[in-house]
Image (cartoon, rainbow, N blue to C red):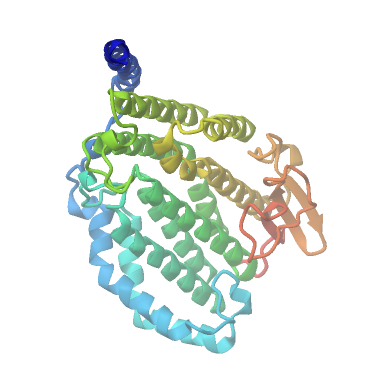
Amino acid sequence: MKKLIKPLVVLLVIAAVALVAAGLLITRSTHSSVTALRQEITQNGDPLYFADFQPQSIDGESNGYFHLMNAKEEILAFNDFLMEGFNGESEVNFNDPKKLSKSNVDRLVTGIEVHKELLDQIESMAACEQYQADLDFTEGMFVSLPHLNLFTSIADSLQAKTVADVSQQRGDEAIRNCISGMQISRLLMNEPILVSFLVAIGLERTMLDSAFYVISSAPTSAESRAELALEIANSAYGSGVVRVLKGERSCGIQTFKDIREGNNDLLEGADASRLIPGFGFERAYLNDDEAKYIEFMNAMIASAAESHGERVRVFAEISQEIEDSGFRFMVTKLILPGILAVTEVVDQLEVKAGCLQVILRLQAEGEVALEDLPEDPFSGKPLLAKQTEQGWTVYSVGVNQQDDKGDLGTLVQNWRQKPDIGYGPALASPFGEN
């Protein structure tokens, strides 16, 4: 028995040395890979860590954030009015304003008159060309949440004001509300934060829907409709997507850095040594995970300018590789899935913007050549248009990739569930034009 102990000890020592050597080799290899990927990011002039997005000083009067803070109390007060004045009444839905009762509309008109100063403050914010919130990005990705709540309330305020203006047949004023909302949404899109971008997208979509409601329900001037068409044409959703994806990439890299340093609660306070303990393999594991995360994000950024179909293919490959990875890429699995659908949301917004532009052209020119319709990002072909006795419907085939004859679904369906996406029916010439 004693004769066996010495060889066993030797074998154990050799095995331990081999494991340490293997750990060092694998760690060095994975470290080289992730270092090269990080260097490529910095060489392209992009921030590596989320904390690198530091606010720049912007003069107050030209900074939309300055006006947002000035309007904060009025925004909250009007939000309280909406909650107290309508909450609990099932028939109240600003997304379906034609179903509002007369008493609700009258209450809304009165409340807006009381809070009319708010709309002046929102106009001042919309007139700004720059937006820089007073944020410290070293505090993490959720640092923007407090001021984003104000943007959500601004969307509600402008939507409510639009409904009130339409009820009084003040179509041009209603269009002005929608344009202000679009201008404000573009300011927010400049933030490199996913949640900020999604709030901006939501505000823009609300304003597009409200604008279609206005031109379908109230007399408007050709000048106002032309101004609305120009504002829609000024959209740059694609550049916003790239900016926010780069911001999310830096946020993910920051997460890996914090985990290594034990400063992140993503894994319930676990530091790297608790992921795969021993022999340096935990460092190799994190390096491998981070490298794959950066590769995935680079692929998504590169595909942002590609067609919807190409992005679907890229995202499907990423999702499949994650699904097949077993115990690898655990951090990537936690932080990546919510990012995959961002560009699809933008496709849906571009569809709505394109459809509304066509309807505005129909109202301005009386007809539009079908071959001149904008491209449908979901099909890669021109948008579709259908004319009935009720008017024109301009639409996209949507996610299901099939022409459902302009069936735009219902309000209770989300955009993925709607058969087609678009607007209509709308008259080629607006009624009661002034």
Percent position (x, y) of residue 229? 54, 50
Q: Relative to 385, does residue 96 appear above or below in the rendering? A: below
Please identify the quadrant where the C terminus is shown: bottom right
Q: Is residue 221 visible?
A: no
- Is 136 placed above or below 125 here? above
Name the side, left or right, on which 320 lies relative to 242. Answer: right
Q: Which corner quadrant holds the N terminus?
A: top left
Vertical position of residue 413 compared to residue 97: above or below: above
In percent of width and height, residue 215 lies at 61, 63
Q: Quadrant of residue 7?
A: top left
Picture residue at 38% right of the left edge, 55% below the top: 184
* Extreme-right residue of the structure: 389
Point 18% across, 49% down: residue: 59
Judge by depth and name the residue closer to the eye, 276 or 118.
Answer: 276
x, y (%) of residue 245?
41, 37
Residue most extreme to the bottom: 103
Residue depicted at x 67% and y 45%? 399
Q: In the displayed structure, does residue 209 sit left or right of residue 144?
A: right
User: How many numbered marks, from 0 up?
Assistant: 0
Along the viewing direction, whichever of 7 and 301 lies nearer the viewer: 7
Side of 385 relative to 421 (left or right): right
The residue closer to the viewer here, 62 or 255, is 255
Q: Position of residue 158 (x, y in %)?
A: 44, 67
| Residue 21 in view | yes
